[in-house]
Amino acid sequence: MQTRLLLGFGNSSKKRSEVLPDDMNANHFSKRKEKKMGNATAKKVRAEILVIWVAVLKISSVSPAAGDIWTNKADMPTARTLLSTCVVAGKIYAIGGGPSPYTAFSVVEEYDPVTDSWTGKAEMSTKRFALGTSVVNGKIYAIGGVGSHTGPAFAAVEEYDPETDTWTTKSDMPTARGMFSTSAVNGKIYAIGGAQSTHGPVLSIVEEYDPATDTWTRKADMPETKYYHSASVVNGKIYVIAGAAREAAPSRTVYEYDPGNDTYSRKADIPTATAMLSTCALAGKIYAIGGDPSVVEEYNPETDTWTKKANMLTPRALLSSNVANGKIYTFGGSRAVPGTALATVEEYEPNPLLVDLNGDGIVDVRDILQIIESWGQDDPLCDLAPRPSGDGVVNDLDLELLMSFWAQPIDDPTLKAHWALDEAGGDIAYDSAGVNDAFVMGGTAWQPSDGQVDGALQLD
């Protein structure tokens, strides 16, 4: 999680802020600030760094990806693993799964991200976990899955209509399976890989379902067998990520499947070999989340590259994830494999828009001045546009986006602490924004009336 810290640059009502980059060290910070403040003030800022690092250890681990925000949301009413989720009209439907990896539910629950609330819905006819679900024309298709640890996988297909809250039986999938993936492209659903039971055999089979005709068609097999993998769609291509070729053997392989010409291309391996993960696509990137081991890694199909991101607040496997209203939501799973099912729900915003640059709760002339100070530079704090990641330089696009929030009050979800450093003595820097008081070390001397705004520390 990103840690946004306000350090000795103002009182609790008017604060100047800095976001610490991942490669932050005292010299880096001092050099950057010396350009703006001069050497005398910079020496005091170096003392503030001691406060930062002591306090950061109390607050959270420093994220490998500044800007990532994970937030806990309302738990699912039913704790479960190996469930599947789909989105229709901004609502997320959590379907099936089980209280442990090897027992099954037919439960369906609807999550509203806007109200952070849950509603029970009509259950499936078939109790199952490790199923696949996809959406075509506003209908959800629940496909395959497994009913028990010892039994065979299902071929059953059911169509759910969220408007009428009803289920309809459709044509069975030709190859019964669970622990597979489904993805929808151009009105067709592609069932990829999986296994015929929890112990195999593992499959490379791909089958296409056409909801319009309720028919199945065999497609080209994957280059290798996979189960407990995940797949997501970007620009009409399906990316099949990680998983395992056999029990207890997680994989790093990634394949791009083009349904248009029924061909596969090998892509850059995911950095962490993992299985039992979940993936979803947001703003042209794919996020591989959780698994065994539980990590979060971002894939860019345009550059065929991977980037490590901040892990979930509750690392877990056997979960499901989906996207609504520009944010990622993760559901259920378990901390261990096998393990107790979780009801946990988290919301993830990979690149949140932080327009309150000086941290005073409103966009005003002080934020414009910060843009001007960084004009023409590669300053991640001020490089706001284009969304989601900026363009590497502070320019008129950033100023235009900032002005669209002019005079609006801002609730900054990343603010973790503010140390005004205006104490007259002692060894505690008090947090005026929360409860993260910091212990000061290093023979420091308080300068309550000689800071940039209200206070500072000076090293001996």
Image: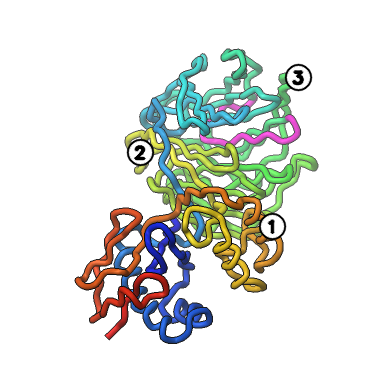
- Residue 62: % across, % down: 40, 62
Cα–Cα gap, marks 3 and 2? 39 Å
- Residue 6: % across, % down: 41, 63
- Residue 284: % across, % down: 67, 49
Q: Are marks 3 and 1 in contact (CB under 8 Å)?
A: no
Which numbered dot is residue 400?
1
51 w.r.t. 77: above or below: below
| Magenta span contains residue 18 | no
Magenta residues? 174-187
In this picture the colour scheme is rainbow
The amino acid on which the numbered mark 1 sits, given as a three-letter code, is Glu
Residue closest to the eye, 347 or 228: 347
Left or right? Give the position of 383 relative to 273. Answer: right
Cα–Cα gap, marks 2 and 1? 51 Å
Left or right? Give the position of 116 relative to 167. Answer: left
Q: Earlier in the sequence, mark 3 or mark 1?
A: 3
- Residue 344: % across, % down: 39, 37
Q: Secondary structure at mark 2?
A: loop
